[in-house]
């Protein structure tokens, strides 16, 4: 049982993510990797720039030995990485040193790692792209792609193609789930996909 | 106003520094995080030359004052070889105070120590754990205007205790000698949940004499609108609730009684420092807002610094909300509040995590645990 009904850090490993989908997805992946004792805090409704500099103020942060921040690349992976790097340097009460490169850790203590989610090898992307990569060999994806192409042919630009494809894919699942994080819990994304290899390798640093 | 304190080897605290204290400070932390010890160290710093405070601190803790170990508990891990050090910096009077507390060895102990040095007895020189002490030396330095002054006070156990004690006889368990050349420019009080209602009538009588009781009545009326007056009858305090008779104030709720006591202490410690242990104790959360608002308000008026401890999240929340609501164009309480969470790190090196009003606002909004 948690010591408090508020957000409190009770584990030595802390992962900070952008929202509930990321929290659920990462939590399922950690479970798949047999990694326990990880606290995940999602900053939903906030941005890393405002939130991260103050995380040292959450009760229990003093026990953190490994800190990981996972973010979407959005339009530019480097911009996303640098923004998080700066926010780590600004953490009050603790001297934490961010890694020099994305998807890596520093060599200091506590360990700090930053992972930026991209679409394959590109410099942009989001969690939805990663989810789609895991199921690219799934037969349903042929239909999903034709649907997107068909909409495109009508001259309609999809507001967010990755989100749209995820929703279309999920609509073919035996149970209706509105969120990609919950879809992860239901096992609709293929966790053994090589698309997740880099992220899995990164998270394996949490294995003591 | 104290704005910085550094503590070494005091009770469970190996080391701790708290800086940037403001007019209103709340200290939070888990049990055994040293909150009360911090208030005690601050209490000694308010009047560094008064060795009797060391006896008083033991009394607050309900310790057996006649026990030979009563003085040892001031030392980290009871190790009297580790000198206790308390350093404070005070704003406005621009003073730095360094207090060192060392043991006064028992006479026969001194002899053994001396023999040890001569190599005659090979006793245990490791920690001084098993040695009894008679009392405490209080050496302190005051730095002001590039000038340093040294003083010395001490407190020792009273050895001339009567052998046949009659029931109810008061015995002075210790004797102290304060350095008379030191005149302390600061004043203050330590309020803990046990002594809070001590000598209420006596304390209130001074307020009555100085015609300040309306300051208190006005504020208590916000909790109890029927209250029209407070009277002192002998040493008892009575409230006029417009009944046929006055009622003793102690029969009223804990909330109003606590606020009454706090307000008396603020007025009586004008230009001073009020240390309040477990401020939320006995206060219902619905009363907290009124208590904080009254404290903010009166403490500004009488120029009192408040340093309090709490376990309660509601209390921290109310502290922030009231500061936000009480601020206006003339006074910005937001600049004057701080919350410090005390964390116990490895080897009892403690750390204070500071929250400004802006940090607090976000922490509360994000539902962070901050205690």
Image (tube, coloured by chain):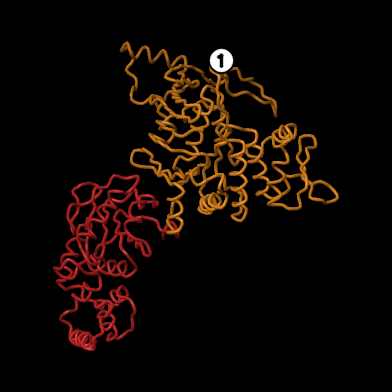
Residue toward you, A101 or B77: A101
Quarter of the image where the C terminus of chain A is located? bottom left
Residue A133 relative to residue A88: left or right: left
Give the orange chain's letter: B
Residue B93 relative to residue B260: left or right: left
Instruction: Name the residue at the right extreme.
Output: B244
Residue linked to disc 1: B180
Residue toward you, B120 or B16: B16
Going 56% across and 51% down the picture, which residue do you hit?
A: B322
Q: Is residue A75 above or below residue B93?
A: below
- Location of residue B150 in the rendering, given as x and y in whole percent from the top left corner: 46, 16
Residue B151 relative to residue A192: left or right: right
- Location of residue A65 in the rendering, given as x and y in whole percent from the top left corner: 27, 50
- Location of residue B112 in the rendering, given as x and y in whole percent from the top left corner: 39, 15
Marked residue chain, label 1:
B
Give the red chain's letter: A
Q: Residues within 10 Å of mark 1 (few under 14, many from 20)?
A: few
Q: In this view, does A116 lie above or below B263?
A: below
Residue B163 quadrant = top right
Going 38% across and 41% down the picture, which residue do you hit?
A: B351
Quarter of the image where the N terminus of chain A is located? bottom left
Going 46% across and 38% down the picture, which residue do you hit?
A: B21
- Location of residue A25 in the rendering, given as x and y in whole percent from the top left corner: 28, 70
């Amino acid at each position: 049982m948690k010591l408090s009904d508020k957000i409190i850090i009770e584990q030595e490993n802390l992962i900070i993510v952008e929202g509930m989908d990321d929290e659920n997805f990462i939590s399922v992946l950690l479970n798949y990797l047999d990694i326990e004792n990880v606290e995940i805090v999602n900053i939903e409704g906030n941005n890393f720039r405002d939130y991260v500099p103050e995380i040292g103020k959450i009760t229990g942060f003093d026990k953190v030995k490994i800190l990981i921040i996972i973010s979407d690349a959005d339009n530019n992976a480097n911009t996303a990485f640098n923004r998080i790097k700066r926010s780590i340097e600004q953490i009050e009460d603790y001297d934490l040193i961010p890694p020099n490169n994305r998807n890596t850790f520093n060599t200091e203590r506590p360990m700090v790692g930053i992972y930026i989610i991209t679409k394959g090898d590109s410099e942009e992307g989001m969690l939805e792209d990663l989810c789609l990569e895991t199921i690219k060999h799934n037969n349903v994806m042929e239909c999903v792609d034709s649907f997107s192409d068909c909409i495109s042919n009508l001259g309609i630009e999809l507001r967010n193609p990755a989100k749209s494809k995820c929703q279309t894919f999920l609509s073919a699942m035996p149970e209706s789930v509105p969120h990609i994080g919950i879809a992860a819990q239901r096992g609709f994304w293929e966790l053994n996909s090589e698309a997740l290899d880099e992220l899995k390798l990164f998270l394996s640093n949490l294995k003591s | 106003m104290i704005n910085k304190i550094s503590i070494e080897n005091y009770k469970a605290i190996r080391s701790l520094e708290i800086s940037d204290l403001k007019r209103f400070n709340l200290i939070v932390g888990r049990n055994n995080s040293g909150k009360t010890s911090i208030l005690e160290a601050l209490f000694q710093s308010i009047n560094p030359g008064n060795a009797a405070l060391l006896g008083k601190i033991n009394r607050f803790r309900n310790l057996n004052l006649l026990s030979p170990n009563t003085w040892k508990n001031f030392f980290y891990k009871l190790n009297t070889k580790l000198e206790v050090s308390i350093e404070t910096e005070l704003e406005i009077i621009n003073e730095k105070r360094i207090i060192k507390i060392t043991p006064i060895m028992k006479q026969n102990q001194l002899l053994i120590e001396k023999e040890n040095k001569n190599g005659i007895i090979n006793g245990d020189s490791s920690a001084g754990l098993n040695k009894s002490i008679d009392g405490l030396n209080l050496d302190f330095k005051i730095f002001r205007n590039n000038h340093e002054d040294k003083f010395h006070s001490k407190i020792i156990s009273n050895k001339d205790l009567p052998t046949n004690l009659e029931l109810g006889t008061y015995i002075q368990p210790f004797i102290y000698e304060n350095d008379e050349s030191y005149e302390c420019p600061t004043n203050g009080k330590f309020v803990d949940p046990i002594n809070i209602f001590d000598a209420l009538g006596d304390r209130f009588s001074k307020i009555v004499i100085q015609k300040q009781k309306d300051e208190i009545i006005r504020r208590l009326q916000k909790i109890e609108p029927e209250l029209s007056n407070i009277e002192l009858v002998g040493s008892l305090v009575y409230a006029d609730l417009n009944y046929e008779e006055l009622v003793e104030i102690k029969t009223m709720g804990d909330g109003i009684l606590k606020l009454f006591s706090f307000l008396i202490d603020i007025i009586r410690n004008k230009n001073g420092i009020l240390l309040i242990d477990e401020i939320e104790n006995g206060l219902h959360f619905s009363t907290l807002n009124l208590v904080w608002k009254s404290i903010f308000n009166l403490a500004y008026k009488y120029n009192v610094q408040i340093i309090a401890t709490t376990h309660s999240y509601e209390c921290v929340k109310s502290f922030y909300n009231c500061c936000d609501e009480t601020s206006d164009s003339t006074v910005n309480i937001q600049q004057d509040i701080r919350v410090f969470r005390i964390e116990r790190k490895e080897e009892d090196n403690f750390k204070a995590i500071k929250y400004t009003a802006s940090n607090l606002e976000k922490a509360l909004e994000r539902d962070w645990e901050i205690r």
